[in-house]
Every structure is written in structure tokens, then in C-alpha cells.
Image: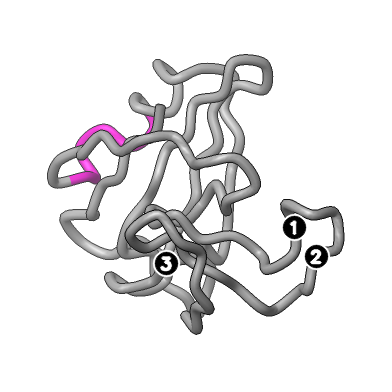
Amino acid sequence: MRLLGTLKTPCPANQRDLIYKVMLHETRREGVYAYLYLSPDALFCSYDYHYPDLEDALENWAGEVEHWTQIDDPLPHCQHDCPLPVRVKGRAEGAPQWGKYEILENGEWKDFIP
């Protein structure tokens, strides 16, 4: 399960970057990943954190997020931090072309430039 939330007020990630939204991705074996985005329109995260469970992650972001929207888990070979069905081109075939992406649209994989 994944939860996507927009922050009420951008929070500092460090001395120069602000976080505008966060996605929590609960996995069966590895706990919960928090993906942090540096713009309201970002599709890929710039930072991430790990929590042992969803309760800890939600507690950490309580009061910071306007509302949570549940989204589907990523499809096989797709980017876990992207809310859209996007994957590295060639990854499913075992020959990833790093830096090149494709998106699933109407049941077909098409080139995608973020």
C-alpha cells in the first residue's frame, strides 16, 4: 500500500531544499519507506527514509500532511517512488537503460520523459 500526502507547509530537507510532499510505501518484508519530493509536481523522490512500520511513519508525519490519498502499489519493475506506472526502459527484460523511462498508457508501454 502507498499513501501520498501534500505537506501543509514545506519542511526543510536540509539547509537548501524544501520537502513539499511525501509518499509512504508499506512493504511486506522491509517496513515502510517515506519518499520525499522537492516540488509539488515531482514524480521521483529526492530523499527517502525508512520506518519499521506504518504506525511509526504516520506518527512522524502527523500534523505535517494536509491529507493522505491511498494509491495502488507499483506494478512489477516500476519505480516505487513514482505515483504513475513508470519504469526504467528495458528493466523487465533484464537490460535496464538507466536514465530512460517508459510509462504504461492504455495497456501499452510508451517512451516517457519526466
Q: Which mark is residue 91?
A: 1
State if disc 1 and disc 3 touch (CB < 8 Å). no
Residue at the image position 47 percent from the left and 65 percent from the top = 103
Residue at the image position 70 percent from the left and 78 percent from the top = 99
Q: Indicate left or right for 30 with 69 as reference.
A: right
Q: Which mark is residue 96?
A: 2
The first of marks 3 and 2 along the sequence is: 3
Q: Nearer the viewer, residue 68 or 16?
A: 68
The three-letter code of the residue at mark 1 reads Arg
State if disc 2 and disc 1 touch (CB < 8 Å). yes
Gap in angstroms between the C-alphas marked 3 and 1:
19 Å
- The residue that label 3 is drawn on is 43
Gap in angstroms between the C-alphas marked 3 and 2:
19 Å
Q: Could you tell me residue 83's position as x and y percent?
A: 38, 53
Q: Could you tell me residue 67's position as x and y percent?
A: 14, 41
> Does the segment drawn in magenta span residue 34?
no
Coloration of the structure image: one colour
Q: Indicate left or right for 30 with 75 as reference.
A: right
- Secondary element at image label 3: loop
The three-letter code of the residue at mark 3 reads Leu
> Which residues lie in the magenta part?
60-65
The three-letter code of the residue at mark 2 reads Pro
Which quadrant is the N terminus positioned in? top left
